[in-house]
Image (cartoon, rainbow, N blue to C red):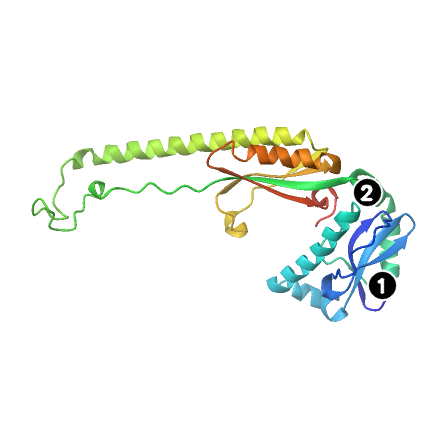
């Protein structure tokens, strides 16, 4: 195999073949590189794109980065069906097979310990969002502007309207009520997320609470309250998914999203 070596994951040896049509980064099919009790899943990639200089430039190209990440994930997804891989971070590249073997030898103890921990387990992701609400608009009567001649007289926009003296107090009262409603909604959402996390943790061997997603970046509607990952034995996954499904409609105004099963990125000790 010529060219640079792109490493997707490290695994225990597995006998089930990957799909024959599977391709990865740069359109190359993944291969197994065995070293002792470990297997590195690798692909051949061109130096023109993955040598240090070109790769650094490509990582600033969001289109290229997105296509590479999708190809990387396709291989990881296929591995997750047949084994419990330890995924390496995106664009992990070595000069040749000997470089990959040296990496596995140097980190053998850590890899084996982590693979033993992940064996037979998958990662599920659960997010809870507070659905966006329509802002309560003011009625035309509250605005104090009638648009000139009204249907009952000749009052203009600059003329004082009936009830204007109380409009300031009414506005402040309305704002206080809105803040109170918002605070109560947020407290209910946090309490729901806390109880859901506790229930789901009963099926998981480990959990990770990630920072809430920024909606401007994720483009997901609503405010992200819970963003959690769960390390779940495959034997418990069906019950885990059923619990999420049963809970989805328990809290009006909240949205629960389930993703997975994934390779155990959040529990691998690698920067995915």
Q: Position of residue 237 (x, y in %)?
A: 70, 37
How packed mark 2 is, by other alpha carbons closer than 10 Å (few <14, some 14-19, many 20 or more), is many
Residue 96, label in figure: 1
Image position of 225 with respect to 88: above or below: above
**SS at badge 2:** helix
- Residue at 52 percent across and 48 percent down: it is 220
> Which residue sits at x=76%, y=48%?
81
Mark 1 or mark 2: which comes first in sequence? 1
SS class, disc 1: loop
Residue in view at x 41 percent, y 34 percent: 182
Direction left: furthest residue: 153
User: Would you name the residue on which mark 2 appears?
Assistant: 115
Can the viewer see residue 254? Answer: yes
**Residue 52 in view here:** no
From the image, state whether disc 1 or disc 2 is nearer to you: 2
138 displayed left or right of 179: left
Q: Residue furthest right?
A: 36
Q: Is residue 241 left or right of residue 165?
A: right
Q: Residue 267: percent from the left, percent from the top?
A: 72, 41
The quarter holding residue 134 reads top left
């Amino acid at each position: 195999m010529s060219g640079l070596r792109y490493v997707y994951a490290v695994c225990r040896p597995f006998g089930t073949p990957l799909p024959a049509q599977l391709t990865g980064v740069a359109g190359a099919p993944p291969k197994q590189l065995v070293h002792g009790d470990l297997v590195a899943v690798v692909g051949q990639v061109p130096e023109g794109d993955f040598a240090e200089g070109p790769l650094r430039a490509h990582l600033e190209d969001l289109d290229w980065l997105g296509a590479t990440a999708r190809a990387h994930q396709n291989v990881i997804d296929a591995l997750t069906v047949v084994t419990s891989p330890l995924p390496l971070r995106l664009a992990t590249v070595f000069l040749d097979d000997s470089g990959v073997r040296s990496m596995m030898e140097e980190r053998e103890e850590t890899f084996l310990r982590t693979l033993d921990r992940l064996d037979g387990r998958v990662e599920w992701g659960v997010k809870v969002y507070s659905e966006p609400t329509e802002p309560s608009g003011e009625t035309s009567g509250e605005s104090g502007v009638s648009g000139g001649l009204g249907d009952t007289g000749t009052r203009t926009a600059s003329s004082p309207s009936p009830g204007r003296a109380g409009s300031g107090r009414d506005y402040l009262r309305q704002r206080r009520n809105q803040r109170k409603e918002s605070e109560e909604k947020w407290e209910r959402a946090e309490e729901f997320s806390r109880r859901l996390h506790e229930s789901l943790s009963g099926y998981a061997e480990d959990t990770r609470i990630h920072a809430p997603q920024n909606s401007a970046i994720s483009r997901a509607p609503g405010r992200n309250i819970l963003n959690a990952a769960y390390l779940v034995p495959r034997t418990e996954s069906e019950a885990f998914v059923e619990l999420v499904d049963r809970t989805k409609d328990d809290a009006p105004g909240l949205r629960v999203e389930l993703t997975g099963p994934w390779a155990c990125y959040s529990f691998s000790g690698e920067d995915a």
